[in-house]
Each structure stands twice: as C-alpha cells, then as structure tokens.
Image (spheres, rainbow, N blue to C red):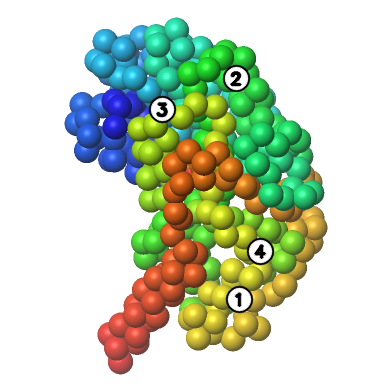
Amino acid sequence: MIKTAIIGRTGFIGNALYSECKKAHPDCIGTTRQSTKGDWDYLNLLDPDIAALKLAESGHKAAIICAAITGLKVCENEKEYTKRMTEGTIQLIQQLVKEGIKPIYFSSDTVFDGKKGSYDDEAPLNPVNEYGKQKAEIERRMKEICKENYLIVRLTKIFTLEYGDRTILDDMASVLISGGTIRAAYDQIFSITLLSDVINAIQLLQKNNVTGVVNVSSPEVWSRYDLAVKMADCLGVSSKNVQRMSLDDLGEPFLRPKNTTLVTKRLDQEINYKFTSIEQCIKQVTDMWNKNKSYTVQVNQ
Ligand SMILES: NC(=O)c1ccc[n+]([C@@H]2O[C@H](COP(=O)([O-])OP(=O)(O)OC[C@H]3O[C@@H](n4cnc5c(N)ncnc54)[C@H](OP(=O)(O)O)[C@@H]3O)[C@@H](O)[C@H]2O)c1
C-alpha cells in the first residue's frame, strides 16, 4: 500500500483507516484538530495548512480526507459553518495537489435526489438537502482542481459488527431486544456497507491506482423497514415491534432522498470486489445480542 496520510484520524472511518495504514507505514500521518497549531499532526478544516505535516518530504503519496461534518441536521441548521468547512476542504485539496499528493475524498449517496435509485459512478448529481449539496460541490470542484490524479469514493451507510458500536444493526438490536419499538421507513431504500469492506476496497483501488469517481457500496438493496423486520425475526422478537412508516412522516424541514442505491460499475470492472453478505452480518449481530441477553438473564438470576 502506498504511504497514505489520514486527514481526521479521530472519526469512525478515519480511526479504522489510520490503524490499517499504520500497519504498512508505522510513521504515516493521521491528523486531528485536537492538537495544537504547528504540531506535526494538527489540521483544522476551518483553516487548513498542510505545511507542518511535511507530507511529500516524509514520502506520503496520498491523503484520505475523512474529516467532515457528517450530520444532515447540522448541515441544515448551521449552513454558514458547514459551508466554511466545505471551502476548507477545497483549500486542503488544492494544497495536496500542489505538493503532489493524491487526494482521496469520501462523498456520499446523498449527492443524488433518490427518485430512481441505481445511480452509477457517472450519474448526474442532484442533491436535495444541504449535506448532499456540500458533498456535490466538493466533488465538482475536486474534479476541476485535480484534473486526473484524485479519487472520490462514494459511500452508503457504513456499519461495523461490534457489540454496542451504535451503528445501524447494533442500534436496531439494542432497541428490539429490550422490548422497544422501532419506526422504520419502507420507502428509505438503500445499501448498508460493512466498514471492513470499504477499507479493503480502498486498499485495492489504491493498489490499482484507480482515479476518478468510484461508488463503493454493498450491492444488496434493502429498505430500512425490511432490515428492521429481519433483525426482529433473527432476534426472536415479534415483528409488531417494527412500525412501518414513510420518510415523509418524519416531518423534517428538509428532504431525505428516498432511494439512494448505487451501482458499482467501476468497482466491479476495476477490482471485482465481493462484499460481505448483509444477512450474514445480521446473523452475527443478532447472535451477539441474543448471547448477551441470556448472559444478562443468568447474571441477574
Ligand atoms: N459513516 C457513514 O455512514 C458515511 C456514509 C457516507 C459518507 N460518509 C463520509 O465519510 C467521511 C467520514 O465519515 P465518518 O462517519 O467517519 O465521520 P465522523 O465519525 O463524524 O468523523 C468526522 C471527523 O471529522 C473531524 N472534524 C470535524 N470538524 C473538523 C474540523 N473543523 N477540522 C478537522 N477535522 C474535523 C472529526 O474530528 P473530531 O474528532 O475532533 O470531532 C472527526 O475526526 C465523511 O466525509 C462522511 O460524510 C460517511
């Protein structure tokens, strides 16, 4: 794996990627805004300056940008602040290109309007909310700035398989097993993707020096409602604990795209990656929660 810096090593994806990159290059750089300005690992997207990181000097060839504001609601409610982050991300990309470092950026399935689904790598962008608009703006500007040596990786909802990790399957299991009810949208059609698959795919994309825009997503299509019903079934909980709803019922002051499924045309052609089956992941998570439930009952008896 080429020497790669991680911009934003403290986040969900950044933390996992940084651990992986360090296996190949123990001295690779992972930045955080929690350090002090001028430190070897400090970077704040509100005022990015990569000079102190000495990336080219220390042999880095690429940088994966994991730092971002990731909440849809934050982007809606704090437009000015998040737009400054977007501008900062673009400045960071410009600085990386100037140093000869290949920028790798995580975009999202929310750059699409969600009317049809099955968006391939080249599908036209049409975001319906501020988060998607800011992602789309970075995609557009990145193409202009970088010309060829860049990679945009479009992700769907990412999860892991740790007990209590608070990602989508774990969250559903935690509510259902304690007798709670989940409201789940039948019209939110998406793919969820295992984090380790994303990391493996990125490593292969880097190894093959793939550039441009690549959708990285499990090919399985689920509705949130079907996922929750399957989880209930595997946990041995009544499906009555899953309430069917529409995304429209959320009554939010912004839109969520409904069908954001991605077609992984380039990924299939260029690295032919095989994603972990979601049913297998559901089984693993529900087994963990069922085991923990019987353990809790034994301890309390
Ligand atoms: N997770 C998903 O399901 C998913 C799906 C699609 C796309 N993506 C994209 O993938 C990327 C990583 O997502 P994630 O889920 O790993 O995000 P995350 O866990 O929310 O982490 C965000 C990171 O950004 C850093 N950050 C926030 N403001 C910053 C600033 N002003 N300067 C520097 N760093 C700052 C945070 O640092 P602190 O620790 O200091 O707050 C943290 O390290 C994002 O671009 C996201 O939009 C994620």
Image quarter hosting the N terminus: top left
- Answer yes or no: do the residues labelled 2 and 4 have beta carbons within 8 Å? no
Mark nearest the camera among 3 and 4 is 3
Q: Secondary structure at mark 1?
A: helix
- Answer yes or no: do the residues labelled 3 and 4 have beta carbons within 8 Å? no
Left or right: 296 as drawn, with respect to 217? left
Q: CA distance from mark 1 to mark 4?
A: 10 Å
- Answer yes or no: do the residues labelled 1 and 4 have beta carbons within 8 Å? no
Amino acid at dot 2: Lys
Amino acid at dot 4: Ser
Mark toward the start of the polypeptide (3 vs 2): 2
Q: Does 37 sit above or below residue 214?
A: above
Disc 1 under 8 Å from ligand 1? The reply is no
Q: Quadrant of residue 77?
A: top right
Amino acid at dot 3: Asn
For disc 4, the marked residue is 223
Q: Position of residue 131 (x, y in %)?
A: 66, 36
Q: Does 246 sit above or below residue 145?
A: below
| Mark 1 surroundings within 10 Å by alpha-carbon count, few (fewer than 14), some (14 through 19), many (20 or more) | many
| Mark 2 surroundings within 10 Å by alpha-carbon count, few (fewer than 14), some (14 through 19), many (20 or more) | some
Q: CA distance from mark 3 to mark 4?
A: 34 Å
Mark toward the start of the polypeptide (3 vs 4): 3
Q: CA distance from mark 3 to mark 2?
A: 17 Å
Q: Secondary structure at mark 2?
A: helix
Mark toward the start of the polypeptide (2 vs 4): 2
For disc 3, the marked residue is 209
Q: Position of residue 13 (x, y in %)?
A: 42, 42
Mark nearest the camera among 2 and 4 is 2
Left or right: 237 as drawn, with respect to 299? right
Question: In percent of the image, x 44 and y 42: which residue is there?
Answer: 271
